[in-house]
Amino acid sequence: MSTSALDQSPRILLIETDEGLAQHVSFDLKESGYDPVVARDATSGLRQVQEVQPSLVIIDWMLAGESGLRLCNHLRKVGVNLPLLLMMARDGVDDRVACLESGADDYFLKPYRTEEFLKLVRQYLKPTSIDTEQLRFDGLVLDLATRAAVRNERSISLTAKEFELLKYLMEHPREVLTREQILENVWGYDFLGESNVIEVYIRYLRLKIEDDGAKRLIQTVRGVGYVLREA
């Protein structure tokens, strides 16, 4: 692949201490038209996020004694809103919740499977058309081009999944949406019924859009799901 082609390819930062796995993932990314950059530990990963300006970051849960969860959490705290995908060895409910609470947008499982991994990457790097449309509801504005929200003149920065969830709610104002509808339309696949991934992200959104003491807009419909409506 030519250098000019790579320059136009989405750059993906892989933070992985296992050299063999890093080479395998990097090869698959290159073959699929992406431009992979590898960091071997959390410290260099943090530096590379700033230096290479990736479109997406992939982080292994286990980083040679360091925690990929802690790294995700730190990246969110310093204002990094890129899609973060976590590589996990287990798929228990507690593991999934810990992943999402760390700030990761999604995860994929070890042992590494090329097709499943690339499908997830494509999902988060789908080309976005230039869209100047804004969604509005009771003082809350969601800009579809900048992927940011504004409420009461206060700018709200959103992660990729937070944006998709808020967008879906704002596209269906005052309509009660079931957990199944939200999972299918925001995540695109089903989590196990006992997973509280939706609750986790609803809590994140509420913290952000109600940070200045504004009234609650995302209402819980007990036993059913959620609805965007005036209190």
Image (spheres, rainbow, N blue to C red):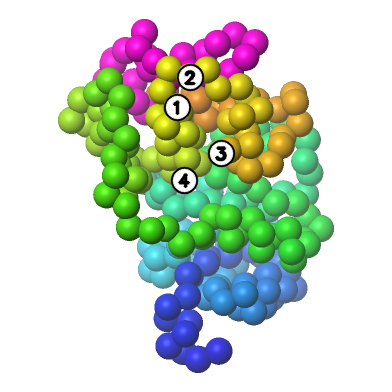
- Label 2 sits on a secondary structure element that is loop
Residue designated by label 4? 160
Residue 13 percent across, percent down from the top left: 53, 65
In the figure, residue 211 lies in which quadrant? top left
In the figure, residue 99 lies in which quadrant? top right
Sequence-earlier tag: 4 or 2: 4
- Cα separation, mark 2 vs mark 3, equals 16 Å
Which disc is residue 175 wearing?
2
Residue designated by label 1? 172
Residue 76 percent across, percent down from the top left: 44, 43
Q: Residue at x 65, y 10 (%)?
A: 223
- Label 1 sits on a secondary structure element that is loop
Front position in the image: 183 or 198: 183
Looking at the rendered image, the disc whose residue lies closer to the viewer, 3 or 1, is 1
Whether residues under marks 1 and 2 lie with C-beta atoms below 8 angstroms apart, the answer is: yes
In the figure, residue 140 lies in which quadrant? top left
Q: Residue at x 73, y 58 (%)?
A: 116
Quadrant location of the C terminus in the rendered image: top left
- Cα separation, mark 4 vs mark 3, equals 10 Å
Residue 108 percent across, percent down from the top left: 70, 51
Residue farthest to the right? 111
Give the extent of the magenta segment: 208-231
Q: Is residue 226 magenta?
A: yes
Sequence-earlier tag: 4 or 3: 4
